[in-house]
Image (cartoon, rainbow, N blue to C red):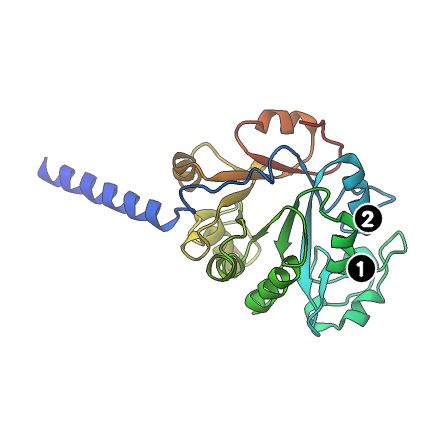
Amino acid sequence: MNWLIGILICLIVLLAAYAWLIRPQLPRRDISHLLGVDYAHRGLWNAQRPENSLAAFAAAVEKGYGIELDVHLTADGSLVVHHDDSLLRLTGRDVHISKSTLAQVRACLLPNGEPVPTFDEVLETVCGRVPLIVEVKVEGGNAYPLSKAVCERMQRYNGPWCMESFQPKAVEWFRLNAPQVIRGQLAFNHAGKGETWKLKLRNIGIASMLQHIWSRPDFVAYEAKSEKKYSLPMNLLRLMKPWFVAWTVRSQADMDALRGKYDLQIFENFEAKKQ
């Protein structure tokens, strides 16, 4: 019997230690400036308005949606808005953003004829009218310079916003250098999935939430469809009650089902009913 008690105590200690490691920023901070709207993933895009285009962002603003967008740093220190590291999928040209100059990136056209937009252009288009979720898209070792550049630009922006990233070092940069900015850690439950062992280990790390050791986020931005009832890290986090953001919701039925479980939702491929 004594050995059973010993094992139980060890398990409790390990669980408490794990909970401490993955704890978010607590007590949770005020995000009222971000609440009350749903967020169009990469803008309100469709066949005529490509994702992360000025046209998609303008359409989202017109409909009153918040916007989620992706920011990269070019080789010459400029900020551009695009999802992938390469421009191949949308422009047909395999230009790698972090290894290219702004001029080289801007020479690539989206399907509607727009150049890849700069972050400045997007901010001017939105002009503070709807809240933004700015995803910091880290490539290689540029987490700190990219985060610094985004933060410096947003100091001149008059509108509600927050940042998020898969890379905990980017979220950590904001925690240490701009703690006033609401920050989010992106995650999913793809533990063990991937074509290579390197990718499998990366996905295990993301699913474990151990990146919170560095990021201590205000919110967890989670791939809602991958959340499992038996997920230990998510169950522990839900007991701690940080803010939760769902990505990416692809139907009104799913959005309605997630109300109350997630505080914010990022959607695409339909026009969400207004809250």
Quick one: SS at disc 2? Answer: loop
Per the image, the residue denoted by label 2 is 50
Callout 2 crowding tier (Cα within 10 Å): few <14, some 14–19, many ≥20: many
Q: Residue at x 77, y 67 (%)?
A: 95
Position of the C terminus by quadrant: top right
Q: Quadrant of the N terminus?
A: top left
Q: Which is more toward the observer, 117 or 92?
A: 117
The crowd level at tag 1 (other Cα within 10 Å; few <14, some 14-19, many 20+) is: many
Residue at x 81%, y 45% (from the top left corner): 58
Residue 192 or residue 256, whichever sits in front: 256
Residue 225 is drawn in which quadrant?
Answer: top right
In the rendered structure, the answer to whether residue 214 lies left or right of residue 44 reads left
- Residue 177, percent across and down? 50, 62
Amino acid type, residue under disc 2 in the picture: Pro
Left or right position of 206 against 22: right
User: Which residue in the protein does label 1 denote?
Assistant: 116
Report x, y in % for residue 71: 67, 58
Q: Which mark is residue 43?
A: none
Instruction: Tell me: residue 255, above or below residue 177.
Output: above
Q: Residue at x 66, y 34 (%)?
A: 37
Residue 6 location (% of width, % of height): 15, 42
Q: Residue at x 51, y 44 (%)?
A: 220
Amino acid identity at mark 1: Val
In this view, the residue in front, 230 or 82, is: 82
Image position of 53 (left or right of 8): right
Mark earlier in primary sequence (2, 1): 2
3D distance between C-alphas at marks 2 and 1: 10 Å
Measuring from the top left, give residue 29's x and y in whole percent: 47, 42
Residue furthest out toward the right: 113
Q: Is residue 10 above or below residue 101?
A: above
Is any part of residue 23 visible from this angle? yes
Q: Does residue 138 appear in this view?
A: no
